[in-house]
Image: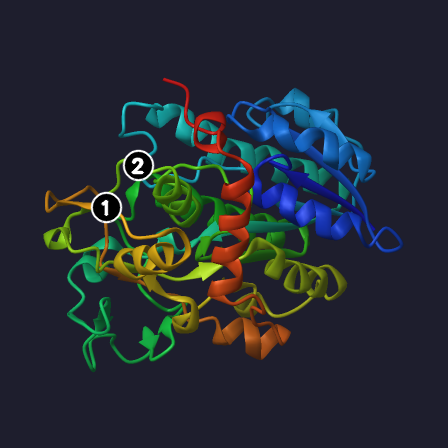
């Protein structure tokens, strides 16, 4: 089966590409990347060595996508994944729309022409900000946790936020581009009889993730902690209690393989959460505790200034993916954090290499 991965030299795309390329008897992997993200060039040589067919192109340009060879399935892993994109002064809102929505449209047109299936890696950021920002929480073991009954029945469970949680605006410009991409993908699937899947990911983390606080907080925190670079607990009283779940992108591969093999299922089952869940959830303060045990204690500054779009607790309930696909993550948080730490030990310049261009 020929798989085309967009954003293949990014952290998520390259991690999945390596895993699929290792199954060379089952998959021939192609990929497109525009290499504009600092650090992405570092993945090019290894992927070529593994037999991945790399195509230098920009998803925003229909002509670049038109030039791609026919494939059986497209995995859309390309995006500007920052919730601050378009409002932080480092990228424009138009660029965000062109990358995240326009690129998806061009890939869907490619799928329509070639009859390829389409899987979108979406995000937990499609869920509505107001009910999440006002979620009643308490501090348990140095981390926020929802108080009993805070997640309304049907919208969440003891495992986290379900797919039924509201997606009404505001969700941030980034969240809106992914939500619009989800809707278009499903409409293309129904209109043109294409298999389409939407996988809403929690925070993805692992070795080699580009060190940016708005996109890879676990990697950024560990690298910065080790290098004794400035770190701050921002908002929520400056305590570091805010919580996210953690998932290694390699854990997506069994789910993707199952979707490639079983393309025709009910449309209501095509959108699933794929996060690490409560078992993988960490606060920034707990992450610092882990770093202190691994590298030695160091101070972290406090800044209680609220930050746009920040939320106290975002943890995904992936039980639907488990029910439909038999999927659950296998890598534990200590394994993921240690993998990042080993990479940080061996790459002292990683934060500079992967920092956004100013």
In terms of image quadrants, where is residue 195?
bottom right
Using the image as rendered, state which of residue 104 and residue 109 is in the foreground: 104
Quadrant of the drawing holding the C terminus: top left
The x and y percentages for residue 327 are: 60, 72
Q: Residues within 10 Å of mark 2 (few under 14, many from 20)?
A: many
Q: Which residue is drawn at 42% across and 73% down?
A: 279
The x and y percentages for residue 340 are: 51, 49
- Tag 2 and tag 1, C-beta contact below 8 Å: yes
Question: Vertically, is 357 above or below 151?
Answer: above
In terms of image quadrants, where is residue 49?
top right
What number is the disc on residue 84? 2
Q: Is mark 2 on a helix, strand or loop?
A: loop
What number is the disc on residue 309? 1
Q: Distance between the residues labelled 2 and 1?
A: 8 Å
Q: Residues within 10 Å of mark 1 (few under 14, many from 20)?
A: some
Using the image as rendered, state which of residue 349 and residue 239 is in the foreground: 349
Q: Which residue is drawn at 40% across and 30% down?
A: 96
What number is the disc on residue 165? none
Residue 126 seen in the current view: yes
């Amino acid at each position: 089966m020929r798989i085309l991965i967009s954003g293949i030299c990014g952290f998520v795309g390259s991690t999945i590409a390596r895993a699929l390329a290792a199954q060379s008897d089952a998959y021939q992997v192609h990929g497109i990347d525009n290499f504009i993200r600092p650090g992405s060039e570092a993945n090019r040589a290894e992927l070529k060595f593994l037999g991945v067919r790399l195509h230098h192109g920009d998803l925003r340009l229909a002509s670049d996508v038109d030039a791609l060879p026919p494939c059986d399935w497209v995995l859309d892993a390309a995006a500007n994944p920052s919730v601050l994109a378009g409002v932080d002064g480092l990228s424009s809102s138009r660029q965000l729309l062109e990358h995240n929505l326009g690129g998806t449209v061009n890939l869907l047109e490619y799928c329509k022409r070639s009859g390829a299936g389409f899987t979108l890696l979406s995000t937990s950021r499609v869920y509505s900000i107001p009910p999440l920002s006002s979620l009643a929480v308490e501090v348990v073991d140095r981390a926020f946790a929802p108080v009993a009954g805070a997640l309304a029945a049907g919208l969440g469970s003891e495992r986290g936020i379900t797919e039924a949680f509201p997606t009404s605006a505001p969700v941030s410009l980034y969240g809106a581009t992914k939500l619009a991409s989800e809707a278009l993908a499903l409409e293309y699937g129904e209109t043109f009889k294409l298999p389409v899947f939407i996988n809403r990911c929690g925070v993805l983390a692992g070795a080699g993730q580009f060190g940016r606080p708005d996109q890879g907080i676990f990697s950024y925190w560990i690298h910065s902690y080790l290098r004794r670079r400035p770190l701050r607990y921002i908002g929520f009283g400056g305590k570091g209690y805010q919580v996210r779940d953690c998932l290694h992108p390699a854990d997506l591969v069994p789910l993707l393989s199952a979707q490639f093999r079983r393309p025709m299922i009910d449309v209501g089952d095509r959108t699933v959460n794929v996060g690490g869940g409560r078992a993988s959830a960490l606060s920034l303060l707990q992450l610092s505790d882990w770093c202190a045990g691994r590298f030695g204690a160091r101070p972290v500054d406090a800044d209680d200034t609220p930050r746009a779009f920040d939320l106290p607790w975002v943890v995904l309930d992936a039980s639907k993916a488990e029910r439909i696909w038999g999927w659950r993550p296998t890598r534990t948080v200590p394994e993921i954090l240690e993998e990042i730490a080993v990479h940080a030990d061996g790459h002292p310049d990683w934060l500079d290499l992967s920092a956004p261009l100013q």
